[in-house]
Amino acid sequence: MTAIDARFAKVAGAVRPARAKVFLALTGLLLLSAILSLAIGPTGVSLQSLPRALAAAAGYAADSSAERDRLVLIDLRLPRTLLAAFVGAALATSGAMMQGLFRNPLADPGLIGVSSGAALAAIATIVLGHGIAAPLIAPLGIYALPIAAFFGGLITTITLVAIAARRGRLAVGTLLLAGIALGALAGSLGGFLAYASDDRDLRDLTLWSMGSLSGASWQKVFAVLPFAAAICLAVPHLVRGLNGFLLGESEAMHLGIDTERTKRITIATTAAAVGAAVAVAGVIGFVGLVAPHVMRLLSGPDHRVVLPGSAILGATLVIVADIIARMAIRPAELPIGIVLALVGAPVFLHLVLRRGIGGGE
């Protein structure tokens, strides 16, 4: 066992019962929010109709009411709930990794500009899709926007790595500054495209920039499954490295951690997670900042707890926000980003005033 593992094992041994209770409570909240997401909606269909919906999906019920129940519960609400969970978990996990890498509780997935690059590609697709880029975008149909957002985030990440790489090493400070610069550049270009767009495109851009799960479908669920699998495979390999970074990069290197490998895997995983989340839900803020911070207040800095706990908490936050977005002004729908900001910002401010940023860590 290395010095890092011994240190965190000693801390974990003292508070393991409390952490078990935290995980149990978070898992219960996630399951409860998922059940409510399936049960609540403007159509009035509840979970009592689930057996009829399943029967209709299996071909054992053919009447119109059973078919309606199947459409609402199986084809609309279930994929929406699953996508909300993925988006929240991806953004929260990315935020936890960024905060660990930069050793800064104010870091979030948008810090290195990946969200801005994905958003710029989506904006360009919306604005140019009816004009000069129509021959390229039209054949992709409904997949044009997600594909563009993902590759926008990927290209931004490749650019960042190329800028920050010096003699085979990634300079974290350069990476941070370059990310801020690229984010600002992407924002200005997106603003220019928005200024040049017509009224129809401007409305689409506004909704995209605020985030929404209204376009959820099983096709999108299946599209994000590879990214979810990649994140689940990568995160366990980052725990020891991110714990080492808490002591400082030099100390982590002396303890035998391959810091460059940790940086590259962290950045690549963040790009995949954020790109996929933006691709299916638009730009959603706040989750990647608050969920990891709350987890550190609840359980301490050990990433063996912070990473999975942030994923569960982030998924719960987005599912609850989506329920509110659906029901607040029915039959219309609020953008989910507005709900998260209205509900989450006061909570985060309360945490800052009560404990101070990082004060409980």
Image (spheres, grey):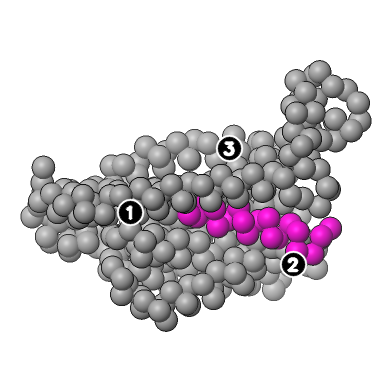
Residue 90 visible, this angle: no
Q: Nearer the viewer, residue 241 or 196?
A: 241
Which amino acid type is shown beneath numbered disc 1? Ala
Work out which quarter of the rendered image holds the N terminus and state it: top left
**Left or right relative to 66: residue 218:** left
Q: Nearer the viewer, mark 1 or mark 3?
A: 1
Q: Amino acid at mark 2?
A: Leu
**Disc 3 to disc 2, C-alpha distance:** 27 Å
The boundaries of the magenta stretch are 313-332
Q: Nearer the viewer, residue 194 or 332?
A: 332
What is the number of the mark on residue 202? 2
x 40%, y 39%: residue: 232
The quadrant in which the C terminus is found is: bottom left
Observer-side mark, 2 or 1, equals 1
Q: Residue furthest bottom?
A: 353
**Disc 3: which residue:** 223
Whether residue 320 is in magenta: the answer is yes
Please tell me whether the stretch drawn in magenta is mainly helix, strand or loop.
Answer: helix
Spot the residue most to the right.
Answer: 64
Quarter of the figure with residue 107: bottom left
Give the number of the disc on residue 18. Answer: 1
Residue 209, percent across and down?
63, 64
